[in-house]
Amino acid sequence: RRSVCFLFIKAVHDVIGHERPQQVRVRIHFSLGAGFYCTVEGIDHVGMEFQWKVEERMYELVQQRLPITKELIHTEEAVELFHRYGMFDKERLFRYRRSSHVNLYAMNEFRDYYYGYMMPDTGDLKYFALYLYMIYISRGIFIDIETIPTVQGYSNNKWAQYTMHNEQKHTSQEALFL
């Protein structure tokens, strides 16, 4: 689950462009069932087009089987990195860290802090779907993290309903979630 969240954040940064990371803030707020409710602040509109672009980028990264590597860096370097990325909460948190080193995970040029183990690469992170989701007045994206289908090709959740990543899926998504 951590690895899919990392993949989502990397895809958002790829879609919006890496030239303005401090202006865009991706927040993973809380879990809902087998997934997470997330918001993206600092862009004009979180709509279906943005959601499709992020989901498409996530599937591209899965196809590339990018390695997810663990790096040990100095805490001061992590503080500077989080400042550059606009992750000010993490920047403040690590200013008070007693340890002189911290483990970060990297996917290409993008690095972030996660507690716990990650998948070795993006190739096995293919069972997910993104949906627009509204909570009160906040419009965000729900990352539905699917279970791995069984040998017969079925799973215990909605994966069987969304087996293809194509326009037909997006059409049914629009009808169901907007």
Image (cartoon, helix red, strand yellow):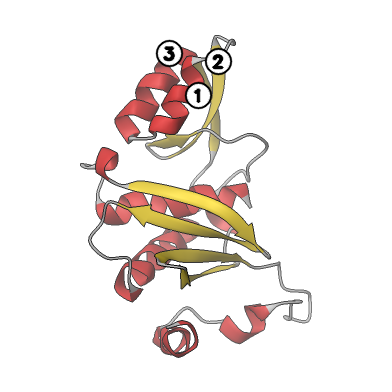
**Separation (CA) of disc 2 from disc 3:** 10 Å
Cβ atoms at labels 1 and 2 below 8 Å apart: yes
Within 10 Å of disc 3 (Cα), the crowding (few <14, some 14-19, many 20+) is: some
Identity of the residue drawn at 58% across and 81% down: 163
Q: Please provide percent x and percent y for residue 128.
A: 57, 67
Cβ atoms at labels 1 and 3 below 8 Å apart: no
Closest to the camera, between mark 2 and mark 3, is 2
Closest to the camera, between mark 1 and mark 3, is 1
Along the horizontal axis of the image, is 49 left or right of 172? left
Mark 2 / mark 3, whichever is N-terminal? 3
Q: Please provide percent x and percent y for residue 139.
A: 40, 66
Identity of the residue drawn at 53% across and 60% down: 37
Is disc 3 placed on a helix, strand or loop? helix
Residue type of the residue flagged with mark 1 = Leu
Res 31 quadrant in image:
bottom right
**Separation (CA) of disc 1 from disc 2:** 7 Å
Residue, far front: 136
Is disc 2 placed on a helix, strand or loop? loop
Which residue is label 1 attached to? 93
Q: Which mark is residue 97?
A: 2
Residue type of the residue flagged with mark 2 = Arg
Which residue is label 3 attached to? 76
Is disc 1 placed on a helix, strand or loop? helix
